[in-house]
Image (spheres, rainbow, N blue to C red):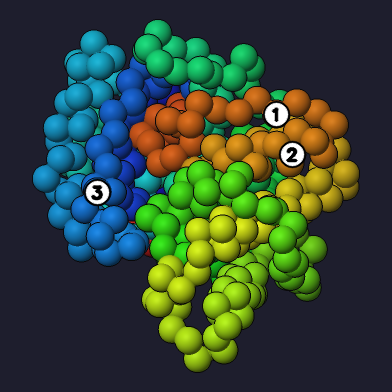
Amino acid sequence: MHLHPCSAMISRMIILGIESSCDETACGIVRDGNELLANAVFSSMDQHVQYGGIVPEVAARSHIEVINGVIEEALTQARLSWDDIDGIAVTYGAGLGGCLLVGVMTARTLAITKDKPLYGINHVEGHVYANFLTTTSLPGYVLPGSAPEFPCLALIVSGGHSQLVLFRDHFDYTLLGQTQDDAVGEAFDKVAKMIGLPYPGGPSVGKLAPSGDAHAFTLPKAKMPGKYDFSFSGVKTAVLRHAQAMCGKDFTFPSRLLPEALSEAQKADIAAVFQRVAIETVADKTIQAFEEFSPASVVIAGGVASSPELRRQLKERLPIEINYQDPKLCTDNGAMIATLGCYKMQKGQPTADPYSLEIEPNLSM
């Protein structure tokens, strides 16, 4: 680990962040940890839809093809040159190995050739830091009016992550609990596929759910030994069994045939009930943690933070207001990586060695 020579305390800075952990190739530029200067994102999602999920090799190839262009686009958006950039931040985990490798090797090369300090960023932690962006001159963004206050309770929910984390301060946090199997976003993907809805499942289920009855039938909520841990594999299997029964079939009926066997009304009911129960599962634990730790603020981070149902349930049940981030900054993006990079530089956190930074696909918080 290397310490940046000016690591004591830095106030003004501009950080460029690179994110390539899954299917988004992204580069963001942030000033002082709160001002969004650029947010360039290229998604290879349309290449994966036909497969019903992310194909790692396809995603990695796409990153290789577009990453330099995305970085250039971010610099153009921000009207900056490399001379204006004070440091580079890059996601080194968690994520898909081949995808992470493209971002990390690009960032390492740029750190060496442009002579900039390099910061390795935990992707999951980065999602929380998107919420510290409060100002921008870029069109089309609605940002929170203020940054989260510490202590801060963070619920991180996306296709790959479901975690509850208590932040006492920057870089001082405790992981309270996490999913022990599927992430909530993954469960949405699988249920969507079951009833013939397109990938990604969260938005597809969310679109259909309002036309169904959210109390048409009951689904179980997992009881976990860890107070704040999650599990979604049981409810997913319960959906499958219920859908099979709805068609008058037993457990041997293949799930791939369900979309044709179910009526549109039945699909809508399944979407509505599953969405309610899955979201209640994460909301229940969030409320429980709020009551135990009395945080000054609550942050909802990750792609599922855009879910209207999640926002509705938390608004009804939490006694404090949640400042949600713009949906464009909830999904994977480089701006959240740059923001965390800003705080790493500001607080004198160790830099990464551009000659040896390795990827960690299974990195946890």
**Above or below, comparing residue 119 to residue 163 in the picture:** above
Left or right for 153, reference 47: right
Mark closer to the chain start, 2 or 3: 3
Distance CA(mark 1)–CA(mark 2): 9 Å
Residue at 74% from the left image edge and 57% from the top image edge: 215
Mark 1 / mark 2, whichever is N-terminal: 2
Confirm whether residue 229 shows in the render: no
Q: Is residue 62 above or below residue 148?
A: below
Can you tell which of label 1 and label 2 is closer to the viewer?
2
Quarter of the image where one finds residue 256: bottom left
Q: Secondary structure at mark 3?
A: helix
Q: Secondary structure at mark 2?
A: helix
Q: Nearer the viewer, residue 294 or 288?
A: 288
Q: Residue drawn 23% across and 11% down?
A: 79
Picture coordinates of residue 4 (x, y %)?
39, 32
As shown in the figure, which amino acid type bears the numbered disc 3? Answer: Asp
Residue tagged by mark 3?
Answer: 46
Residue 90 in the image, given as x and y percentages of width and height: 34, 41
Instruction: Please give left or right for residue 153 compared with residue 205 in the image.
Output: right
Q: Quadrant of the C terminus?
A: bottom right
**Are circles 1 and 2 on residues that touch, CB within 8 Å?**
yes
Q: Can residue 231 be seen in this snapshot?
A: yes
Q: Which residue is mark 2?
A: 314
The image's mark for residue 149 is none
Question: Residue 182, located in which quarter of the rendered image?
Answer: bottom right
Q: Which mark is residue 322?
A: 1
Which residue is nearer to you in this view: 155 or 236? 236
